[in-house]
Image (tube, coloured by chain):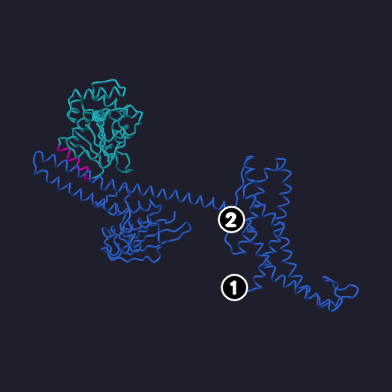
Chain colours: A cyan, B blue
Amino acid sequence: MRLLIAEDDALLRAGLELLLQGEGFEVVGSWDNADDLLAAFTPGSADGAVLDVRMPPTFTNEGLRAALELRSRVPDFPVLVLSAYVEDRYASRLLASGAQGVGYLLKERVGNVGEFVDGLRRVAAGGTVMDPEVIAQLFSRRSSRDPVRSLTPREFEVLGLVAEGLGNTAIARAISVSETAVSKHIGNIFAKLGLAQSDSGHRRVLATLAYLRS
Amino acid sequence: MRPPSRAGTRTRDVSFLVREGGYWLVSLAVLLAGIALLPFVALGVGLYAVPGFLEILNRLAGRAQTRSAAFSSAVIPFDPRRLSGRYSFTELAALLSAPETKRDLSWLLFHCAFAVLAAALALALPFGAVLYVAAAPLWQLFPPDAPLELTIFVRSWSDAVLMVLLGLGYAAGAWVLLPWLARRFSAATLAILSPRRYADLARRISDLSAARASALAAHAAELRRIERELHDGAQNRLVGVVMMLGLAQRAAETDPAAAVPFIGRAQDAATEALAGLRAAVHDIYPPILDELGLGGAASALTSRSPIPCTLDVDGLLRAPAAVESAAYFVLAEALTNAAKHSSASRIDVLLRTESPPKGDVLVILVNDDGRGGAKVDPTAGAQAGADANGSGTGLAGIARRAAAFGGRLVLNSPDGGPTNLRVELPCAF
């Protein structure tokens, strides 16, 4: 799988290249700023991009804007955006560009190489990966009268995993319960949130996040 | 300067009072014009002349204030009113009841009532004294049927002596009364026209609001700078640590020996993160500043410099802690930069407080005799702890610090040297 990287910190950029190449990805280009990446990008030249949010020249959200620009040139072009802190509005803006092939993770998640690479593969395959912190931030915003508050802690946890793009089997493994129990939880969640049940993991994320950011 | 003689100050008193008498004519004319205007104002049509009238009155009052201030050697700020333009009826009403209007009108009445009396006394007393003393002894020159008439008809030497004594009385009265009168007149003018206390307070409040806004802006800029320093330094290095440890773990799954280089790199990154944190913490407020003040802290810095360094802090005053902290950082960064890049054989450092009209400014001058060519690289990140690949990073940090305090960096560094660096940090917000 061919990837583009934009990360302004030299050490982190080198580390990312090393990590991704070690995991069998092909890094076809890496830059220390977003503009150069956009200038070099041609549709079909890569299968996905990993971008740091904060880069020169303004050190605000260059990476995010570059991700949106890439997706406007190639619809649903897979992008994984990395950030030192989570900002749920960034997540919303990414999702607004279409929920297929979008990821938004805290930078330190790269430390868990296995999960990071899995997440990247899910994004490249058209999935959605949101950092658990994003979900937590969205939840903490909710008012007490919000139906999300009526979820039990376990359902809450399951919803977080759903939002991360995990299927029932993976969720069952993650929280060590049976798959039947997971689908029961999910059924409860959707009932409490007033959402129609669906089999597609991808559409579940969409529905959840669309509801959360409403 | 020699203090003026007693007679000199009295000449000044008399001339002040006489001049006020002259301006009394103008005051009277303005007062009469105002009175003439009243019926038209009552009818409504005269309202349009009100702003112009008030402006003329204000100028006149301002002149009187300046004259009295000069006489009393007082310094009084005079803010002329600018009243041209069109006014609605309510604005005109507000204008008429404004404290400045009342102030100027009170002065006009005062001036019309007393200036002419004061001037008359200032002229008549000395004139009378001279006339009586000089004329009375000459009474015999006048024919008996038209005798010399002073206060009484002078027909004998006893009359003449009486009149000379009266003249001396006038002189004594002038000598004592006129200085008192001039002082009182000037003081009364200034008291009537001095900006009212609330106008004064209003000005101070607006000054303080502006100062507070700029202090808050400086504070916000400083917080952003610290945030960025922590983000680019410690935070990114720690992500590097986590990443390298992740790689090590991955490598160890297949070949434990392959993990070792990653662990080494993780350790390096952790060390850098610590250095970055240390620098950031130290930058927030260097402890040595509390202990020794900026002068002492600067001398600690210059004595550590690998290049021989002179320090002059003679003209340095105490500044707010945040400003001294910024100055300390600027100096430390400038010295580090010079040591790294300049190849200079000597550095001269001068810290002083300059006082342009807009408040104190702490100035840091660092001059070296090195090879010059230093440039500010505005895109350079503040890679705390990490070795910068040029002098631009350090200078960019200096420029950012200065900008955070509303100050500036002036760099003069032609190729071949020497390098003159000047940083100005405003102390008073």
Residue A3: quadrant of the picture: top left
Q: Is residue A18 magenta?
A: yes
Q: Quadrant of the N terminus of chain A?
A: top left
| Residue B241 is at least partly visible in this image | yes
Pick whichever of labels 1 and 2 is earlier in the sequence.
Answer: 1
Q: Which residues are magenta?
A: A10-22
Question: Mark 2 = which residue?
Answer: B78
- Mark number displayed over residue A184: none
Q: x, y percentage for residue A143?
A: 36, 31
Q: Classify residue B77 as left or right of residue A168.
A: right
Residue B17 vertical placement versus A36 (above, below): below
- The reply to whether residue B413 is visible in this rendering is no
In the image, what residue type sits under mark 2? Phe
- Tag 1 subunit: B
Picture quadrant of residue A89: top left
Compared with residue B349, is residue A176 higher up or lower down, i.e. above or below? above
Residue B40 pos. (x, y %): 72, 43
- Label 1 close to label 2 by CB (< 8 Å): no
Q: Residue at left 17%, top 43%? A: B244
Q: CA distance from mark 1 to mark 2?
A: 28 Å
* SS at circle 2: loop
B151 displayed left or right of A48:
right
Magenta stretch holds residue B243:
no
Chain at tag 2 = B
Which secondary structure is most common in the magenta stretch? helix
- Residue B220 placement (x, y as % from top left): 38, 47
- Closer to the camera, A70 or B363? B363
The image shows residue B132 at horizontal and vertical percentages of: 79, 73
- In the displayed image of the protein, which residue is found farthest to the right? B145
> What residue lies at 23% left-to-right and 38% top-to-bottom?
A5
Amino acid type at circle 1 is Pro
Give the residue pinned by disc 1.
Answer: B3
